[in-house]
Image: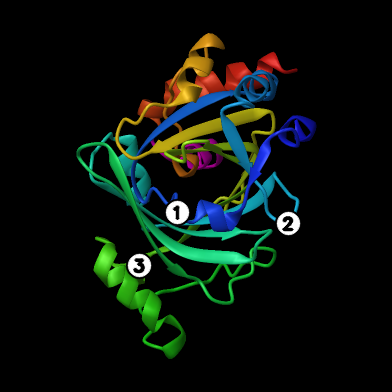
Amino acid sequence: MEGIIKTYSPITLEEMSGIKLMNRTDTKFVTTVDRLKLLLMLARDDYRAQDIDGKRIASYYTAYFDTPDNNMYIVHQNGHAGRQKLRIRSYVDSGLNFLEVKTKNNHGRTKKKRVDMVGFDPMHPDYGIRFLRQDDQFKQYDEFLHKHLRYDPSILTEHLENNFKRITLVNKAKTERLTIDTALKFHNLKTDNRADLTGLVIIELKRDGLQHSPILGMLRELRIKPSGFSKYCMGSALTNPALKRNNFKERLHMVDRMLSSMN
C-alpha cells in the first residue's frame, strides 16, 4: 500500500491549511485492505496525498472522554441527533495535540471545535486528566469546554483510547478531503479489554455540503457502500460487554464478516 501512495502527487500541510472543512458533512465507508489497494489505484489521477516530511501514512492517537454512565456512547447508540464527543486527538508524527469537541446537529452536519493540548504526550498518555481543576494549566481548557460542551466537564474521564494509521487524500479541486484509516487498535480504560481491527479500513469523505466527489463513482464500482462507523462507539462496544449495543449489532456483524474473510 505504501508503494501505491508514493505514486500520488503530494500536498503539504501548508497547502492543506485552506481545506479545514470544520463545518462539514461526513460519509463513511468500511472495507478491507485488499479493496483499499484497488481504490487507491483508481484514484491516483484525481487526488493528491498529504505528505509530512516524506511520510504519507501518518500515526494517530485518540483518547475519548465520557460520563460515569457512558452517556455520550448511549446517546449515539440510541440514535439521538445533536450528540457530542470529547476527545484528545494527537497527530503523532507532527507533534500536534488538540482537545476537541465534536457536535453532530439535527441536519447531519458535524462541527468540530478544538484547542491546543499543550504538553500532552501520546506515547505516555496521562489517564488521570480532570477538568475544572481551577489551576492555570487547565484554565483555557475549562473556558473552551464551558463555551462548546453541553456536559459538565468535572464528571468526565477517559474511557477509551485508540491508535491507527491514516492516509489523507485531497481532490485536485481542493473541495474535499478523504481520510483512510487502517491498523485500528482499541484499549478500554475502564475494562482493560482490547480490540485489534487490523485489516479493516475506515474511509471518510469530508466535504462542505454536497460538492461533486470523484471518489464516489470509484467506491460504487468496487461495491464499497456507505456505512456508519464511530470509532468511539464501535471500540467501546467491542471492549465493554456491559454496554447496550442493539443498534450496533449489524455493524459489529459486518466487522466480524470482513475480518473473517481475511483469515
User: At 48% from the left edge and 24% from the top edge, which residue is drawn?
Assistant: 214
- According to the picture, the residue beneath numbered tag 3 turns out to be 155
- In the rendered view, tell whether residue 249 sits above or below residue 161: above
Task: Say which amino acid is labelled 2.
Answer: Asp
Q: Quadrant of the C terminus?
A: top right
Q: Is residue 190 visible?
A: no
Camera-side residue: 153 or 181? Answer: 181
Q: CA distance from mark 1 to mark 2?
A: 19 Å
Of the numbered discs 2 and 3, the one sitting upstream in the chain is 2
Of the numbered discs 1 and 2, the one sitting upstream in the chain is 1
User: At 63% from the left edge and 28% from the top edge, which residue is drawn?
Assistant: 200
Task: Say which amino acid is labelled 1.
Answer: Gly
- In the rendered view, tell whether residue 54 sits above or below residue 221: below
Q: Position of residue 96 (x, y in %)?
A: 58, 65
User: At 44% from the left edge and 73% from the top edge, which residue is drawn?
Assistant: 130
Of the numbered discs 3 and 1, the one sitting upstream in the chain is 1
User: Which residue lies most toward the bottom here?
Assistant: 136
Q: CA distance from mark 2 to mark 3?
A: 40 Å
- Circles 1 and 2: CB atoms closer than 8 Å: no
Q: Position of residue 147 (x, y in %)?
A: 25, 69
Element carrying mark 1? loop
Write down the region rendered in magenta. Answer: 234-244
Colour pattern = rainbow
- According to the picture, the residue beneath numbered tag 1 turns out to be 18
Q: Quadrant of the N terminus?
A: top right
Q: Is residue 32 visible?
A: yes
Instruction: Say which quarter of the image contains residue 100.
Output: bottom left
